Amino acid sequence: MMGIKPKAAATLLAAALCGLALSAAAATPVDGRDNLARVQKGTPAEQKAAIDAGRKVAQFCANCHGEQAGARYAELPNLAGQHPIYLLNQIEVFRTGRRLEPFMQGLGKALSAEEKASVAYYYANLPATPSVATPGPRSAEGGQLFARNCVRCHGPEAHGGENFPRLAGQQPEYLRQTLKRYLKGGPERIYPPMTAAVMALGEQNIEAVVAYLSSLK
């Protein structure tokens, strides 16, 4: 990448790795995905039944992630409004140990395919709300930085999708810790496209992006 500035090189690397990650995710079978597809194509009554079943499964999750998916602990993510396939993918990476968290790994192994699908569908249908009522002083700057460094994967409104999480409305401390873990490396967060993206963003700009994202709906 001779002649390309370091930040530009990191952005190009993130884009390339992002494409590879999307291809790999699409090719990976995920437990519960067929069940979820049936629910999504089902009748309103069947979809309501899936939400009711998911609410029961989510009792295991509420101790940490809250009753309405507003997390009880600042360092944990809100789950409301996440894409259901993204949630299934995360259950799978916890189950296989690709993300390290003993409780989540045990839960991933204990749930049936139907339970995984129903709890993912339940959380996906909960309304998402901002974690911060008033945008911080660097929020506007954070929006510009997000548009340059993050929008390709997380979408123009930070609502994510099948392969990338919804960041809009997330808790500030969760966003802050996660971005710094990707930047500095460690067993909790290993994903080269995100490391490249945060390198392009720069540690000095993390707070601005956190202020922007946490105030979004």
Image (cartoon, rainbow, N blue to C red):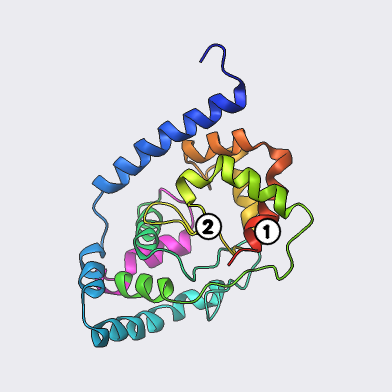
Above or below for 134 versus 142: below
Tag 1, which secondary structure?
helix
Tag 2, which secondary structure?
loop
In reply to whether residue 194 is colored magenta, the answer given is: no
Label disc, if present, on residue 173 of the rendered structure: 1
Residue type at the position of mark 1: Glu
Q: Which residue sits at x=45%, y=65%?
A: 82
Indicate the position of residue 178 as horizontal and vertical percent values. Answer: 59, 50
When asked about the image quadrant of residue 183, the answer is top right
In the image shown, does 56 or 44 lie closer to the viewer? 44
Residue 88 visible, this orientation: yes
Q: Which residue sits at x=46%, y=69%?
A: 81
Label disc, if present, on residue 157 of the rendered structure: 2
Local crowd at mark 1 within 10 Å, few (<14), some, or many (≥20)? some
In reply to whether residue 114 is colored magenta, the answer given is: yes
Q: Which residue sits at x=54%, y=58%?
A: 167
Above or below for 89 versus 117: above
Q: Main secondary structure of the magenta part?
A: helix
Indicate the position of residue 188 as horizontal and vertical percent values. Answer: 53, 48
Above or below for 23 versus 72: above
Indicate the position of residue 165 as horizontal and vertical percent values. Answer: 47, 56
Q: Which residue sits at x=40%, y=82%?
A: 55
Q: Which tag, 1 or 2, sits closer to the chain's start?
A: 2
As drawn, the residue found furthest toward the right would be 137
Tell me how many marks there are.
Answer: 2
Local crowd at mark 2 within 10 Å, few (<14), some, or many (≥20)? some
What's the magenta region? 98-115
When asked about the image quadrant of residue 27, the answer is top left
